[in-house]
Image (cartoon, rainbow, N blue to C red):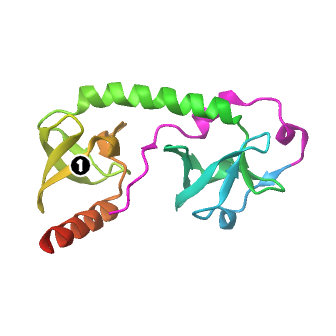
Amino acid sequence: MKKPLGFIAALCAAAAGPVFAPSTLAQESVAPAPLSSLVPGKKVYDNAGEQLGTVAHVDGDKVAVKVGNTGIVVPAGAFVQTDQGPALNVAKASLIQSVQQAAKENAAALNFALKVGADVRSAGGSTVLGTVAEVGENSATLSTAEGPIKMRRDVLFVSKAGLAANLTAAQFAEAVRQSKAASATR
């Protein structure tokens, strides 16, 4: 199974907004990046032209960008088109600092919310994937319609809807299917 990114769903353009710095983007007349340029694997730059990361996934108007060992979800409208490619009007150092701070806050919230009996929702929050049956040091076992499913702790976060996984309902179902298929061949 492909390792999902540790997306910090709460960190988006609103969080990145206050960290604008004087930049070449501020001095240029820039157009919004076309949605067609925001494809998985495409490099994303900061306001000084330094590579921030790469587009990992696009879902409607939300773009997941892999930044180091983690990622962010940003509205597609926050990207501008530069000569290098799509960019965000934020300094890389400021963004990384914000991501690290959000990760610390998420870890604290997760420690509080990850309890036996808690529902775990999909990344969008609309689907309950399962209920926490057991909490381990680095994982949680969910009770699901497919039986018990063990999830790594780093795919869980706290959203406005409560405890969630950084997987859509479809991605979760596919991961469960692949896991069961792999277990059957062992």
Q: Which residues are magenta?
A: 1-29
Q: Is residue 41 left or right of residue 46?
A: left
Residue at position x 15%, y 67% from top?
A: 183
Figure label count: 1
Visible residue check, residue 61: no
**Quadrant in which the N terminus appears:** bottom left
SS for tag 1? Answer: strand
Question: Horizontal and vertical percent for residue 162?
Answer: 29, 37
The residue at the point 20 percent across, 34 percent down is 137
- What amino acid is at disc 1? Met
Residue at image position (26%, 27%) is: 111
Left or right? Give the position of 21 relative to 37. Answer: right
* Residue 47 lies in quadrant: top right
Residue 175 lies, with reference to residue 148, above or below; the image says below
- Point out residue 128 in the picture as x, y percentages from the top left corner: 23, 51
Q: Which one is in front, 61 or 165? A: 165
Return the x and y of residue 131 as percentages of the image width and height. Answer: 15, 46
Residue 53 placement (x, y as % from top left): 62, 49
Please tell me whether residue 24 belongs to the stretch shown in magenta. Answer: yes
39 left or right, relative to 148: right
> Residue beneath label 1, please?
151
Please tell me which residue lies in front, 128 or 100.
100
The residue that appears at 83% across and 35% down in the rendered structure is 23
Q: Is residue 89 visible?
A: yes
Give the quadrant of the C terminus.
bottom left
